Image (cartoon, rainbow, N blue to C red):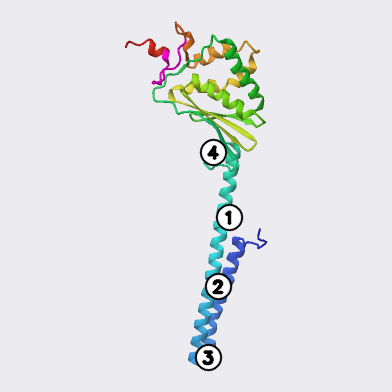
Amino acid sequence: MSHATLLTPKKALGLAGVAAIGACAACCAVPLLAAAGLGVGIVSAVAVAIRLGVGLILAVVGAGVLGVLVLRTRARRASACNVACAICGGCGCKRADEASIFSSATPRPGEPIVCTADLRDQPTVQAQLDGYAAAFQQLLRVEKLAGKVRWIFANRPGLSDELRALAENEHQCCRFFKFDLRAAGETVVWETTATPDASQVLDEFARLPERLSQHARGRAVEPIKQAIGAAGLSFASDASGPILPRHPCSSRPAHVLASEPE
């Protein structure tokens, strides 16, 4: 790293002022030289030399001032960007230590606000909630933005894999959500985006850490279901008949397709 000291704008402007004063003094000295009896040719040559030298000095100092100002502006922007990215990635830049963990598909237009999970499969449902409860032990904060919610976790060995599995399971039954997970330094960011008509469901989903903390293990399913159902989420398991898998050629749940006429 260079040990050369950059001029601050004030110092650089000071040098420019000194150069300007020197130029003025040199120009004023030309008539005096002529009056002293020096030849016109010599005086003209001296005048040209002085003007070229002063012009060169002013050009160098001006370029230096401009360079310092550009460097300081870039440094401020980089500093602000690093701070914003460290907090939430909000500045639009990408951290060097940021890596994607999982990114689900974007919901299709008109995606039904329906959870297709079979809530009657209690062991599977409880395993998902247990996974969330374990992960939320590392939760640092919740950030709510327009149309999305972020859970910020303190990273630890194995957490990325655990969160990826949870997000993959969640996406299988709630296709109206989009999930994006990324590791950023010492944190893992889980971002959930919802379609506009699912905004209230998203707000309730963001409260999952709070909801789980309010109920003993094994007793959280029904209260969580009621709360998010009141926000506008329908459940395929409430429909009559067996729970069918999602139709492979449609964005609509299979139980909805099965109830429609051919």
Label annotation for residue 57: 2
Mark in the foreground, 1 or 3: 1
Mark in the foreground, 2 or 4: 4
The relative height of residue 200 versus residue 98 in the rendered view (above or below) is: above
Cα separation between marks 2 and 3: 27 Å
Label annotation for residue 72: 1
Q: Residue at x 60, y 68 (%)?
A: 15
Sequence-wise, which precedes: disc 1 or disc 3? 3
SS state under label 2: helix
Picture quadrant of residue 248 = top left
For the residue marked with disc 1, what is the amino acid?
Arg
Sequence-wise, which precedes: disc 4 or disc 1? 1
Cα separation between marks 4 and 3: 69 Å
Sequence-wise, which precedes: disc 2 or disc 1? 2
Q: Which residue is mark 3?
A: 35
Cα separation between marks 2 and 4: 44 Å
Which region shows up in magenta? 243-254
- Please name whichever residue, 229 or 130, is drawn nearer the observer in this view of the structure: 130
SS state under label 1: helix
Label annotation for residue 90: 4
Cα separation between marks 2 and 1: 23 Å
